[in-house]
Amino acid sequence: MCGIIGYVGPRSAVQVIMDGLRRMEYRGYDSAGLAVVADGRLAGRKKAGKLTNLAAELEVDPLPGSHQGIGHTRWATHGGPTDANAHPHYSADGRVAVVHNGIIENFTALRHRLEADGVVFQSQTDSEAVAHLLSQGLATGLDLLTALRQVCLQLDGAFTLVALDAQAPDRIVAARRNSPLVVGVGQGENFLASDVASFIEHTRDAIELGQDQVVEITPDSVKVVTFAGQVAPTRPYRIDWDLSAAEKGGYDWFMRKEIYEQPRAVADTLLGRIDADGRLCLDEMRIDRAKLRSVDKIIIVACGTAYHAGLIAKYAIEHWTRIPCEVEIASEFRYRDPIVNASTLVVTISQSGETADTLMAIRHAREQHAPVVAICNTNGATIPRESDAVIYTHAGPEIGVASTKGFTTQIVACYLLGLYLAQERGIKFGDEVAALVRRLAALPDQMQQVLDGLDQVAELARRQIEARSVLFIGRHVGYPVALEGALKLKEISYLHAEGFAAGELKHGPIALIEPGLPIFVVVPPQGRDSLHDKVISNLQEVRARGAWTIVLAERGDQEASRWADCLIELPIVPTLFQPLVAIVPLQFFACELATLKGYDVDQPRNLAKSVTVE
Ligand code: AGP
């Protein structure tokens, strides 16, 4: 997820762009850049790091005055956060500048074709290919809008593109597919942006672009057509958010916004990882197949929510690969004198990529010559840099301290790793892997179904506002879901909450049950041997002792609904994939209860987004 802005009008383009990028830094902040058209030429600056680095650059080396330009603040997907990989990207002839948000799935094939045409790439990014393709179209005499349409018809994946042509000094073009783009309509000026926060101080009149549409703006006109060239109807609207709400996309908290971003984040994490033959291709996995075949044990190390993702991963990885898989709290790992050697694959999971406990754990693992794979959401962070290979999640920046989309995309990345290992070791045939990947690809829609039905959970939070303690129970992958649900509630509503393996209740925790005590029960899908029935028994046990049962069960589970004081129905998904739909109501419940209590959901007391101390 990146921040993009384009401007054409009477104001200073540099000023409008830099102000707009500041308002979108939460969308990505590992590099930034801008380009303007002045005297028929492009002029631009771009810098790795925070936007302040770019501002400092402009102080010492200002751009010429201009009333037309584009800007970008980056959240890296392809290629680390370097000056060269920062946007804008330019065509070899210096005529075109492009900024991009999203993932171009067929980037490799496009790059090979362009390099065969003699193009020399200046960056590792997928975005640069668009600049070269666009200039090739212009060189044949196409106008800028047509040239962009022709390029979009060649692209697969998710993208918002905004482009400048040095020879078109009064217009900017943009395109969108599966990625946000909005037009800000001013008086004698117009804006293009990832979200309204970037131009809301100049105009509250906007036009939302539809799927597969391109737009051309001049100071006095907005023209929208489809990729095929048909004039597209526009949907003008009036923005009634204040600036703070605009930065959160209209939500009250970044956490709530990020809960709702999960379907997109999961879909983006899957993008570009399945080739035309349906095989998994994890191009960041730089551990050779022979090494992967020699692995005889996997140890997952992580902290907090990432650790819970690892617990879920264990069930899937062991089931698919038949390799023993341990999951360790990173701060405990190196003190237990673990048995680690060159045949142990160590997998670290970290949203920030900077967690000190996890970093120390992988340094210990590497001293034992173990290959290390990082699952991380932050391109170029310390942990992936110190690992042998990395699988990046593509959740975009996660601002809320309580991890949500970070968690669900970590689980998906772990699934991809497990299936990749099974594929590379020949444990699963291609068609078996492809079938599971197809089920994974259906999950964003199923998660969206849960998100569309959360009013019930908001009511539940209102009912439980006085609760003094909440328990969570589950079995199999439902057990880590119970742990994660409890952690979410603990860390933002400061309430005692505890997760248990449902089978453990009778070994002690059931003594906690008293009349009215709210208990979330994660019921596995029906059909998986005795798993479902055993949890129904646990549900009966706690209900018999007066607990107030909040039951999460798949749609149509009559048995579960019989024992539910509150039933939250989930889409029917495979057992191993249920955490992705079951966790959503628990995240939302914690967010809603903390909001009702008047707490700061995004920055809870005593916590930090990235714990860089041991
Ligand atoms: C989760 O909501 C917390 N913010 C915390 O447990 C977090 O998951 C943990 O600190 C690990 O952070 P990381 O994923 O950035 O390594």
Image (spheres, rainbow, N blue to C red):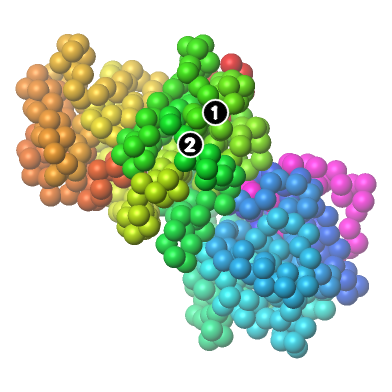
For this rendering, which residue is in front, 18 or 550? 550
Secondary element under disc 1, as helix, strand or loop, is loop
Residue 256 in view (yes/no): no
Q: Nearer the viewer, residue 377 or 210?
A: 377
Q: Which mark is residue 342?
A: 1
Residue at 91 percent across and 62 percent down: it is 64
Where in the figure is residue 261, as x and y percent of width and height? Answer: 45, 49
The magenta segment: 49-76
Picture mark count: 2
Q: Is residue 477 above or below residue 422?
A: above
Which quarter of the picture shows residue 184? bottom right
Residue plotted at (56% across, 44% down)? 288
- In reply to whether residue 56 is colored magenta, the answer given is yes
Residue 256, picture quadrant: top left
Q: Which residue is mark 2?
A: 294
Q: Quadrant of the C terminus?
A: top right
Q: Is residue 4 magenta?
A: no
Asked whether the viewer can see residue 329, the reply is yes
Nearest the eye: 217 or 531: 531
If you read the primary sequence from the N terminus, does the residue marked by circle 2 or circle 1 appear first? 2
Q: Residues within 10 Å of mark 2 (few under 14, many from 20)?
A: few
Residue 266: x percent and y percent? 44, 50
The tag on residue 280 is none
Q: In the picture, residue 38 is in which quadrant? A: bottom right
- Vertical placement of 226 versus 517: above or below? below
Amino acid type indicated by mark 1: Ala
Q: Amino acid at mark 2?
A: Ser
Determine the CA span between mark 2 and mark 1. Answer: 9 Å
User: Outermost residue, right direction?
Assistant: 60
Q: Nearer the viewer, residue 482 or 180?
A: 482
187 relative to 531, above or below: below
Q: Are marks 2 and 1 in contact (CB under 8 Å)?
A: yes
